[in-house]
Image (cartoon, helix red, strand yellow):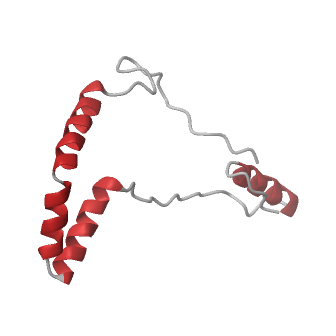
Amino acid sequence: MNIEPIKPKQPRRGGRAKGTLNKVTNDDRKFWTSIMKGERKRIKRELAALGSYEYLQTILRMNQFIMPKMTSTDVTAQVGSMTEQQLDEQLNKIFQINGKRAV
């Protein structure tokens, strides 16, 4: 069994080239970062004034804008008709992406 990556049904038409930065978003992010740098002392002071529950709630809310969210990946395959060797080969292909060996 050969697992192929899913290919788009139609070629891309228009828009930015793949990997091109969105200039407006980049400029806005730099502007917002400069504002937040100037507010660090105040933010720390305001956080310190919160109760434990409000402090944790605020930190968790802020965290979602700073840390990327983890997402799960669902992989479905027809393994019932595969031999053990074929399964091992497929697992090794999958894990080689991460530089690990499955079997």
Q: Give how far across and how far down residue 31 sits, in percent.
A: 20, 36
Q: Which residue lies furthest to the bottom in this view?
A: 52
- Identified at 68% across, 58% down, the residue is 78
Q: Can residue 91 be seen by looking at this rendering?
A: yes
Tell whether 69 sits left or right of 1: left
- Identified at 82% across, 59% down, the residue is 88
Which image quarter is the C terminus in? bottom right
Q: Can residue 82 be seen by looking at this rendering?
A: no
The correct choice, above or below, for 54 with respect to 7 in the image is: below
Judge by depth and name the residue closer to the eye, 24 or 81. 24
Q: Give how far across and how far down residue 60 sits, in percent.
A: 28, 68
Q: Give how far across and how far down residue 37 sits, in percent.
A: 22, 47
- Identified at 77% across, 61% down, the residue is 102
- Identified at 29% across, 32% down, the residue is 26
Tell whether 9 sits left or right of 88: left
Q: Which residue lies furthest to the front in this view?
A: 41
- Which corner quadrant of the image does residue 48 belong to? bottom left
The correct choice, above or below, for 13 with respect to 41 in the image is: above
Q: Give how far across and how far down residue 32 sits, in percent.
A: 20, 41
Q: Residue furthest top?
A: 14
